[in-house]
Amino acid sequence: MRLNQITLSVTDMAAAVEFYLTLGAIQIVDTPHYARFALPEGDESFSLHLRKEPPSPGHCLYFESERLDEWVAELKSRGLSFKGEPEDKPWLWREAELTDPSGNTIKLFYAAENRLNPPWRVEKRKY
């Protein structure tokens, strides 16, 4: 099994597309109601779907970079606002948080080995 994509609801497609292009995503589909992006590393993708109502709270999209602090500084110089500076979290990730123009929570992070192998990892479980 592989994860194909995550789709976020947005209320302003043009503003959302500009935001994700600023983050560094690569747009591969462009319609008035739907946009899809590939990432510069790996083969993951995500999409945006235009909706009239704001997105539901509780969703969060994570993007990882080994050069987190530099990336955040670059994005700030391009006009993006963050809720704070990158900081080390108790779950052993370094994170910085911002929101897209529709209010979706976006976290930029770096976790290294702790991304999939934290000290509290359980043995692999499956059905």
Image (spheres, helix red, strand yellow):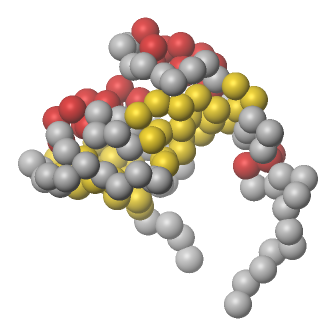
Count how many numbered circles sit on residues in the image.
0
**Quarter of the figure with residue 70:** top right
**Quarter of the figure with residue 66:** top right
User: Residue at the spot x=25%, y=30% of the render?
Assistant: 18
Q: Position of residue 29 (x, y in %)?
A: 22, 50
Residue farthest along the top direction in this orientation: 77
Closer-to-camera residue (37/73): 73
Residue farthest along the bottom direction in this orientation: 127
Q: Is residue 76 above or below residue 92?
A: above
Instruction: Say which quadrant the C terminus sits in.
Output: bottom right
Instruction: Say which quadrant the N terminus sits in.
Output: bottom right
Q: Is residue 59 left or right of residue 15?
A: right
Q: Position of residue 109 (x, y in %)?
A: 62, 35
Q: Is residue 84 left or right of residue 115?
A: left
User: Residue at the spot x=58%, y=29% of the render?
Assistant: 96
Q: Position of residue 62 (x, y in %)?
A: 54, 45
User: Residue at the spot x=34%, y=39% of the render?
Assistant: 103
